[in-house]
Each structure stands twice: as structure tokens, then as C-alpha cells.
Amino acid sequence: MTTTRLPSPVDPRAAEPGQIELVLSQIDSLPTLPAVAAQLLEVTASESSSARQVIQLIESDQSLCARILSMISKASVGTSVKTVERAVVLLGFHAVRSLVLSIQVFETFSQRMEQSSTCFDRAGFWKHSLAVGCAAKMLAEAVPRGTGAKVQPEEAFVCGLLHDIGKVVLNACFVKSYDRVLARVEAIRGCIADVEREVFGLDHTVAGQRLAAHWKLPEMIRECIWLHHQTPASTPSRIRFPEHVRLVQIADRLSREMRIGFSGNCGPDRSLVAAGSTGFDKAALDRICAGLPEVIEARAELIGLNRLTSRDVYYEALAKTNAELARVNVSLSMANRRLEQRSRCFEALRTLNRELGHEPAQEDICRVASGVTEMMVDNGPAAMFAVSPGRSVMVVAASNAAEGEPRVEILPVSAVGDISAVTEGGDGWQRVAAIPGTLLDRLMSSLGRPPGWYWPIRHQHRFVGAMVIGTERPAELEESMSALASAFGAWLAVAESRVFSRQLSEDLAELNRRLVSSQEELARARSLAMIGEMAAGAAHELNNPLAVISGRAQMLNRAEVDEETRRVALLIAEQAHRASAIVSELMEFAKPAPPQAADFSMADLLGRIRQEWLEKASLKDPQFRLQLSDDLPPIHADASQIKTLFDELIRNAIEALRDASEPLLFINCRGHIADDRLVIAVEDNGCGMTPEVLEHATDPFFSRRPAGRGRGLGLSRAVRYAEINGGKIRLTSTAGQGTVVLVELPVAAG
């Protein structure tokens, strides 16, 4: 019998995902089917072929001839067959073709596979292929009459035998890559076709179909190779041999369920049998499953397998089933442990959500989270710390079942130490060596024992805290601790966002206040600038006429004029000087002279001012009180301007006291809380001011007095002098109860 050599396996790196054409080109480079098989397919496919042609082809290969005669001698045909001619007559074209084809394909690949070093289970593969072929043959024989096109049992056999030939092709062309496929399938317990598509870009159904086309195998075989992994619902409707395909699909799944040989499908199978869509009743399928091992035994030796008994098939299937059950039991046990851990995790999260309530603070989150962590590690002592950049603090909470309620501490971040090694470290359980000593001492004190491990808590890749335990690392809780860390991180991030939101609201309110104040100051500055321009213009325009008027008045005031003329001349000169003084006063208010700041005693200045006003005002000594601290710091300002400031305030206070029954003017001086300001309060119990008057009290030219009683620049000038000397004036007043003026002035440095 002739032998055919396969090409050497290619470099596995050539079979990268997506390089489908490269894989197919390797398949196309495989040698053709042995000559006897190819010629036999050609002869049996022709309607004009004779039995003599088939006999001559088989007799040309002595090994193949012996195989055919051996098969006939073992078959229950009721007669002795010693010639190929008699065998062809008894078996028919279809049986002979199927037998020759199966023998030739098996020998073509078996010799090559035995010579290569591969993880591929060669014997198991052929056992599975043989089982599918035998099952397909039995199914074809069991098809009820009148149910559609009858499938030749031998055709069904060869279709089933070759259905997985694509696995052999891929293994022969890409040995190392296919070993990776097998290892991956075993690791994930999945379907080999899915992994083949990941590695090669195609699976063994496509590779097998390509080889069948290359060998010019009958179309029924090609369709069965291509579609044997499909279900009837997903099988294309426009194929020529749907019954052949259906029988192979059922046979493949029956063989897999019986665990005969190696199929490469480790995962659960959506069985056609279980789905009840095979078209066979359960009794017929049970009979096929029961008789399949004996049929496999009869066929095994004919295609070149070592003697395979039905007992071997049963024992192997039983061993695989037991191994699968053991694996399933282990998997179920692990799944139960995971479910138990997840149940504890869900209970912990439920406790967290229930106890935190609405808008919890970071202290509440850490307190509850430490208790939840303690519950997860079987009541071992646990702690939690969180960093709050917005508050510049670290919140530490520790829970110990033996001590009751968790302890919560708030520490300044600056007092904890450098935690960069913690914040920049890895995820998952970490040794506490990265935690700075100060924080580690706090945790040790709270836990009652040295902490051993911590789990960083991050939110959107930003470190927000950590869970700390005083027990050994529970490696089996990785998934649950990760879920808890995500939940804790989300809660802490929300709490921190509320801190920032509150701070932003406060900052916004302060900025709005400053904006309004700045707008008022800007409007006031513009008003003063306009007044200054007006005063400068008025002074320029009025001083010359006033000088002329004053000069003419002095000329009229001569000794020879009569008394009435002299009196009128004096009045004119006096009013001219008064008008000139008003212009000068406006200029001084709008553009005051720069202050000549120096250090001086506020107590001495106020003492002199009080004495002057007692001498020129109607107030008596008990009515004008001065209360000063003994240790007042010196003031750094222009003393003359500050004296003018207080003169204006006292003048306004005395005016407000004009109608008071028991007038009282009180000046009190105290230090500011910041120790860089001095606050002087000027209080009176006069008529006070209404809110409307108070609002405009410091506006230039505003006066509540009757016309002719003042120009409305007193308080305005006082405010002006306070500002240019670095101070501030604030007024509070109630109509009928009096007024309080607070003057803030800067103290001397050092």
C-alpha cells in the first residue's frame, strides 16, 4: 500500500489570530488523498462505472484488499467470502467506498501523528471519531421507514468517522500552536472550536471542510465536517445532504455524552438529545447507546486501531465520567465557598447602607466600615482610616468585638506623617510596613494588637483611605474585599464631595460679599474722583472772582465811608472768605494730603481731644466719659488726620445729643482679636438714625440736619481719613436710642 507524507509543521508564530489565509494555505499544501482512495471515489461517483473497475482498484493494493476481505469475514453475511469480487457484490459500492476511504484517511494521518511530539490525544481522537461513525451508522439503520430520504448506513459511518478531521489537520500543520489550544481548553473547560478561533482565526470545522475540498471528497462528507457543531435550528436550509448532517450532529453529541474518546469539548453541551429535537424516540436512542460499544469493538481493528473491546469503552467512559463528577464536585465546593463569601459581602454592604443613612460624615463611614470589615474577617479586630483633603484631617476608626462600639479619632494630616508610600502602593492586601509610625501606633492602640495587613481604598484611581486588620491575610476574601473597598471608596468620595461643596458655597458667598463691597467701594471712589474734579474746577473758577469780591469789599471798607457801607463791605468780605473755605474744604475731602504716618499714643490723643471738647462744648465732665486700657499699643498713622477724624465723630455725636434729657458721650478703646488692630468705640445716647439715614450717613453732602446747619462732609471726611491711614469705620444706630461708631486703626509694628 502506498504511503503519503505530510508537510513538516510550520512555525507556530505563523498562526496568529486573524491570519486565516495563512492557515488555509498550509491546509492547501497538504498532499492529496492516496491514489487508490482518490480513484475509487472517482469510479464510484460515476453512474457508468462497473463492479469490475472497483474490484481492479482494490486488488491493486494488497494491504487494502486484505482489509476488505477481513471485514467481510467478520460480518454476519451468512456465507464465506474469499474474493474481492464477491465482497463488492455483497457490500455494494457505498459500503466499499466508505470502508476504503476511512482506512486510507486513518493511515494517512496516524503514521504522521505517531512520529510527532504533541499533546494531542491521538488514540482518544480516533476512538471518538470511530464512536461518532458507528453511532451515525446505527442511527441511519434506525430511521423509521417513510420519514424521508433513507441514508446509507455506510455513508453515515464515513461521515461520522471524518467529522473531526479538521483537528488532525490543524495539529499536523501547527503542532505547538495546537498544543496551546489544548492547554487553554483544559484550563477553561470550554469548547475547542471557540479556542481554535481565538488562536487561528478559524476552527476545525472550516479546516476540515477545506481539506475535504482539497481531497475532492463527496459533498455529503464536506457538509457533515462543516456543520457537525451546529444544531438543527442553526443549520443552513440550503444544503444538499441535511439528513447526513443531522445524523452526524446527533451521533457526535451521543458520543460526547457517553465520554467515548477525546472530543476536545470539556464544557457543558446543549444536547440535542436533551432538547428532544433528534427525531428519534428515547427508546431507540437508549438502544443505540447500549449497543454502541460492541459496534465500536467490531469496527476498531478494521481501520487500524489496536484491539478495542466494548469493556474498554465502558471502563474508559466510566472513568471519565467519574473524573468529571469529581471535578464538578470540586467546582461546586469552590462555588459554594464563593457564594458564601458573596453572601457575607452582600450582608456587609446591606449593613453599611442601612446604618449610614442620609449624607453621613466621614467619621460615620469609617465607624460603620470598620465594623463591617471586622464582620468579614470573622470578628477579628479591624480598623479604617480615611484622608479628607478638604478638612486637612485623617479620620481613624477601629472596631474590636471585645470592646463594643468602634472608636473614632480625628487627626490632623500634618501630625500623621508621610503616607505617600501607602497612597502610591499597590492594590490588594499590603503589609503595614508602608504605614508611617505615628499612624501605626494609633492603629495598634485602637486594635489592641499590632496590625498586620491593609487594603487600600481608591475611588477613580485616587487614594481615599484603607482597611486595616489585626489578623492574618484572608486570601480567599479577595473578591469580597475588593467589592467592599469599592463601596467604601464611593461613600468616602461622596462625603468628601459634600465637604468641598460646602466650602465652595461658603467661598462663593464670601466672594459675593466682597464683590458687592468692591462695587460699592468702586462707586464711592468714582464719586470721590468726580467730586475732586468738580472741586478743582470750582476752585479754579471761583477763587479769582472771590479774590476780586474780597478785594473790592476791602476797598469799600475805608474810614471815610458811612457805617452802613462799612457793615455791608465787611459782610461781603466775610462771605467771600467763607465761600473760599468751602472750596478748600471740598478740595481737601476729594484729594486729601498723603498721611504722614508715625507712631503715637492713642490714649494721649483721645485725652487731649476730650479736654478740648469739654472746653468748647456744652457737655459737662460726667457726660463725656473716656475709658481706655492701660496697655494700649501705639498707633501708626497721621496724628493730625486721626484727630480730625475723631473731631468730626464727636461733633456729630454732640449734635445728636442736643435734645437728649441726659446726654452721654462715651469713648471706649480695646485691642482687636488679631492684635494688629485697635478698636475705638464712640457711643452716644442721642436721637440715633433711622435705617434710611444710616444707609447714607457716610455719603458726601448727605445731612439730616435742616438747611444751612452743615454741608454733610463730617462723617464722610472721617471715613476718608480712616481709609487712607489703613483703618476702617463701621456705624450702628437705632432711632431714639443712640449711635455707636467703631473705628479700627493699625497698631505700630513690633
Image: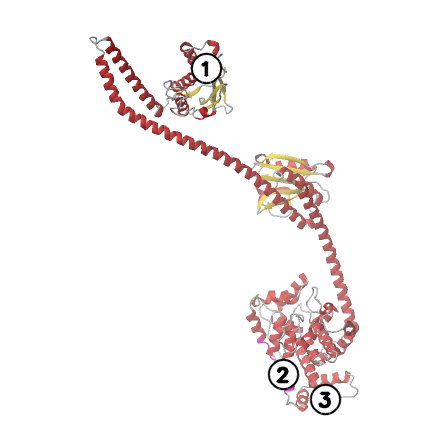
Tell me where residue 640 appears, x and y as whole percent. 38, 18
Quickly name the residue at label 3.
Answer: 89
99 to 281, vertically: above or below = below
Q: Name the dominant secondary structure of the magenta segment.
A: helix
Q: Earlier in the sequence, mark 1 or mark 2?
A: 2
How many other residues sit within 10 Å of disc 2, few (<14), some (14-19) or many (≥20)?
Answer: some
- Name the element at disc 1: loop
303 to 386, vertically: above or below = below
Quickly name the residue at label 2.
Answer: 38
Amino acid carrying label 3: it is Val
Would you say 402 lies left or right of 667 here? right
Span of residues in magenta: 28-46
CA gap, disc 3 and disc 1: 145 Å
Quickly name the residue at label 1.
Answer: 657
Tell me where residue 354 appears, x and y as whole percent. 68, 42
* Quadrant of the image occupied by residue 502: top right
* Quadrant of the image occupied by residue 24: bottom right
Residue 740 highlighted magenta (yes or no):
no
For discs 1 and 2, the disc positioned in front in the rendered view:
1
Choose between 539 and 457: the one closer to the eye: 539
Mark 1 near mark 2, Cβ–Cβ under 8 Å?
A: no
Choose between 444 and 680: the one closer to the eye: 680
* Quadrant of the image occupied by residue 492: top right
- Residue pictured at 71% horizontal, 87% vertical: 88
Amino acid carrying label 2: it is Ala
Amino acid carrying label 1: it is Leu
Q: Earlier in the sequence, mark 2 or mark 3?
A: 2
Residue at the left extreme, as displayed: 560
